[in-house]
Amino acid sequence: MLQGIKIVEICGIGPGPFSAMHLADLGAEVIAVERDTGAAAHANLLNRGKRSVVADLKSAEGRELVLRLIEDADALIEGMRPGVMERLGLGPEVCQARNPKLVYGRMTGWGQSGPMAQAAGHDNNYVSLSGALFHNGAPETPPSSAFAALGDIGGGAQYLTIGLLSGILNARATGKGAVVDAAILDGSAHMLQLMLASRNIGWMTDERGQNIHDSSPFYATYRCADGDFVTLGSLEPQFYALLLEKLGLQNDARFAKQWDRSRWAELHQFFTELFASQSRQHWCALFEGTDVCFAPVLGPREAAQHPHNVARGVYFERDGLLQTRVAPRFDGEVVTPGAIPAAGEHTAQILAALSDPASSVWQSV
């Protein structure tokens, strides 16, 4: 869907490379500019579908390479601390002087401004300050979230991707590029808007352990007899009624008033003991595929073998490496993304194209 869009990525870690990978997954042409570490590296799954060139950005040659690449590019992605690209001579003003239509994507944790802009941080720090971590987990345990998912990808990479595509559309209409300030702090806070809206109907509060997901019996995670886990999301009344019917509790007066919070602790304990009495497979056989709103908790390798994920082709393996396929899908097509290049694999090819006035470095041109 993004054929013809050309991206230069100044390689870093985490959300920037993921955004570039996602754009490549969707058909954009991405040239990844990597450092030559001189050491053997593991296959970088986030480089799939890209071409890789190595360069020393502190050298005049490396700087000029980037400037040559962005001359015909739609966007540049960088994930340095604020000011680093400027010190390298590759800040937005310099790059947009070379290409006024360039969309300059900046991926940081804290943002380009503010008193913490220069501080180091990681996913869990950014989502902590944004408010996004607070409600995660049970009230008796410290808040936690899956590594790099909530902040780096949810609040970071996806917002950078949306910003880049919005900027590219605007540049094609106006001839003027833009600087995209994509901060994980901002994105993870923005994702809370639905949760903030739910406060108005009483689903959420400002206290841990007083919300539908951390105290109700019908929207929760339970441990099974075999030590595995299952999730319930029987939020709407018709789904809750079906849950009770499946469990033979439809005539139990204790469960008659779904939103009676004074009973939630007692009923949650009842469900805790009930689900612990049988294996996960037992509950899957009873609930899976029904409108109870149910799913087992699976690790990635187990998820890759689940019949629904197999039918949709959600996962695949290449060279012994488990990967996920392209999302979203268009017209029902299941797309297998491009190969993973070795660092610098395309350096000679790209340098040759740049030195030949009759050729283009961009394959899609």
Image: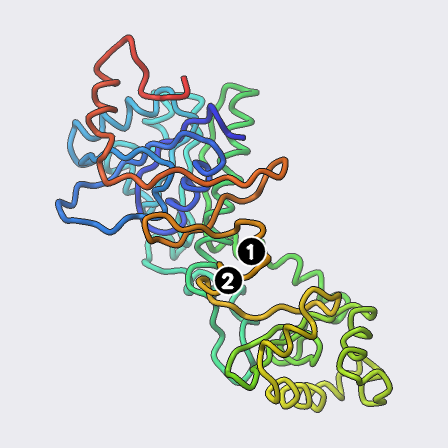
* Residue at 85% across, 89% down: 253
Going by the picture, which residue comes out furthest to the left?
38
**Is 298 left or right of 287, judged from the image as shown?**
left
Taking depth in this image into account, of 119 and 23 the one nearest to the observer is 23
Q: Vertical placement of 45 versus 213: above or below?
A: above
Measured in 3D between alpha carbons, the distance from the residue under mark 1 to the one under mark 2, in whole angstroms, is 7 Å
**Element class at badge 1:** helix
Hey, which quadrant is residue 56 in on the image? top left
**Element class at badge 2:** helix
Q: Hey, what amino acid is under mark 1?
A: Asn
x and y, in percent, of residue 141 in the image: 49, 82
For label 2, the residue is 303
* Residue at 41% across, 40% down: 20
Which mark identifies residue 211? Answer: none
x and y, in percent, of residue 358 in the image: 29, 8
* Residue at 41% across, 41% down: 21
The number of callouts visible is 2
x and y, in percent, of residue 135 in the image: 57, 71
Q: Vertical placement of 37 versus 308: above or below?
A: above
x and y, in percent, of residue 312 in the image: 58, 50
Q: Quadrant of the C terminus?
A: top left
Q: Are marks 1 and 2 in contact (CB under 8 Å)?
A: yes
Q: Hey, what amino acid is under mark 2?
A: Ala
Taking depth in this image into account, of 31 and 134 the one nearest to the observer is 31
Mark 2 Cα-neighbour bin, 10 Å: few <14, some 14–19, many ≥20: some
**Is 98 left or right of 88, judged from the image as shown?**
right
Mark 1 Cα-neighbour bin, 10 Å: few <14, some 14–19, many ≥20: few
Q: Vertical placement of 364 versus 264: above or below?
A: above
**Is 256 left or right of 354, judged from the image as shown?**
right
* Residue at 21% across, 29% down: 347
Taking depth in this image into account, of 111 and 8 the one nearest to the observer is 8
For label 1, the residue is 309
